[in-house]
Amino acid sequence: QLQTLESQVREAVEQLGAQKDMTSKFMMESQEQAAIVAEKDQKLQQAEKEWSEKLKENMFQSQAYFSKAQIELKAEHDKQVEEMKTRHDELSKLLAAREEELATAKQSLLEARTETSVQTASREQAEKVLMAKVENLQNELTAIVSAKSAKQS
């Protein structure tokens, strides 16, 4: 029985040794796996940090670009509004000048019509006077011709 007991103890010690070796091997593999996981975790955290920084930088650049674009658009809009105001002012001045020219032309036309009416009336009067003179001259000529004919007879 002692031998059996010794043999069982030896087997138990061998099994314990084998289990110890397996446990050590498992522990080493677990540590290696943990190291790999830790390294991957560290790389992942670094990648997340870099991505976050790039995202912040891109957001800042986008905001800067958007702000610049807004400023440029506002400046272009203001410039166009100013050009439109200037053009409106120029057109208003041109319109006022044309209206003044039109009023002057209307006044000149009215004066010309009045002058033409006066000249027409004067010409008609002059024609009457001339017609009267022509008639008088014809009468005198007829009288002279009659007197000459009477003398010859």
Image (cartoon, rainbow, N blue to C red):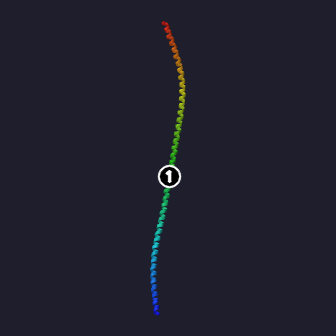
| Dot 1 amino acid type | Leu
**What residue did someone put label 1 on?**
73
Residue shown at 53%/31% (left/top)? 109
Q: Residue at x 46, y 71 (%)?
A: 40
9 in relation to 48, above or below: below
Q: Where is residue 75 shown, x and y percent of the image?
A: 50, 51
Rendered residue at 54%/33% (across/down): 106
Residue 2: image location, x then y, percent: 47, 93
Q: Tell which residue pokes out farthest to the bottom in this image.
A: 1
Looking at the rendered structure, the secondary structure element under dot 1 is: helix
Which percent across, then down, holds residue 68? 49, 55
As drawn, 108 above or below 25: above
Q: Nearer the viewer, residue 48 or 8?
A: 8
Q: Nearer the viewer, residue 136 or 150?
A: 150
Task: Please state which of residues 19 and 43 is positioned toward the viewer in this rendering.
Answer: 19
Q: Position of residue 44 (x, y in %)?
A: 47, 69
Q: 49 or 116: which is nearer to us?
A: 116
Q: Label 1 neighbourhood size at 10 Å, few (<14), some (14-19), many (20+)?
A: few
